[in-house]
Image: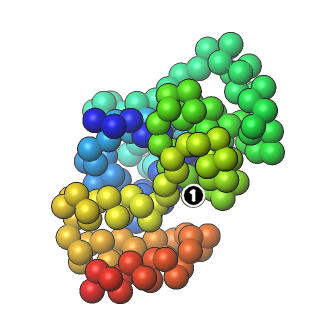
Amino acid sequence: MKLIITDTNVLFDVIKIGALTDFFNLDYDICTTVFVIEEIRPSGQRELIGTFIRANKLTVIEFTGEEIEEVMNFDIANCLKRFTDKSVIWKSAQLNCPMLTGDKKMREIAVKIGIEVHGSIWVIDELFNTGLISSEKAIKLLEQLLMTNSWLPKNEIERRINKLK
């Protein structure tokens, strides 16, 4: 299985559109940082994520004091304000694995340092392309994504919906 690390906003997107179970059925070893988990405040969402952690579907990466210092000194990510974002990029670079994010700045930095980057739309593409969901469900999830995340490229989502019809 291929390792992939996710940030907070992709987790929030898949929760909001009701695709969390499908997401964790992808053929990836999905991980995130402890700092991402700490950002999940609503108890219902935290419990949902906790279910997948306990089922060993989501690996939470802890950091030593030395690693925290390395993340803080990770100069390529200086323009990022949030430590959580820096931790995801740093760990992705360290593990040499793809990263999931919906954050434009994180994406730019990751691409700049050679990290493969995908987002929430890609998750739905993967679910469909691997046969985990039907085209009808993919359309439904894409439509829900349009309604719940106004930051995503509307034209890309609509193009995918039209292609699936």
As rendered, which of 151 and 76 lies closer to the eye?
76
Q: Residue at x 36, y 71 (%)?
A: 141
Q: Is residue 67 above or below residue 148?
A: above
- Residue 109 relative to residue 127: left or right: right
User: Residue 148's spot in the image, x, y percent?
Assistant: 51, 71
For residue 63, what is the image quadrant?
top right
Label total for image: 1
In the rendered image, the vertical position of residue 112 relative to residue 37, given as above or below: below
On screen, residue 5 versus residue 35, left or right, reads left
Q: Locate residue 120, reporting x and y percent.
A: 46, 60
Q: In this figure, which residue is indicated by the disc labeled 1?
A: 102
Q: Is residue 80 above or below residue 149?
A: above
Q: How is the image coloured?
A: rainbow
Q: Nearer the viewer, residue 73 or 55?
A: 73
Quarter of the N terminus within the rendering? top left
Q: Quadrant of residue 14?
A: bottom left
Q: Is residue 40 visible?
A: no
- Residue at (52% x, 82% y) in the render: 155
User: What amino acid type should be assigned to the residue bearing mark 1?
Assistant: Gly
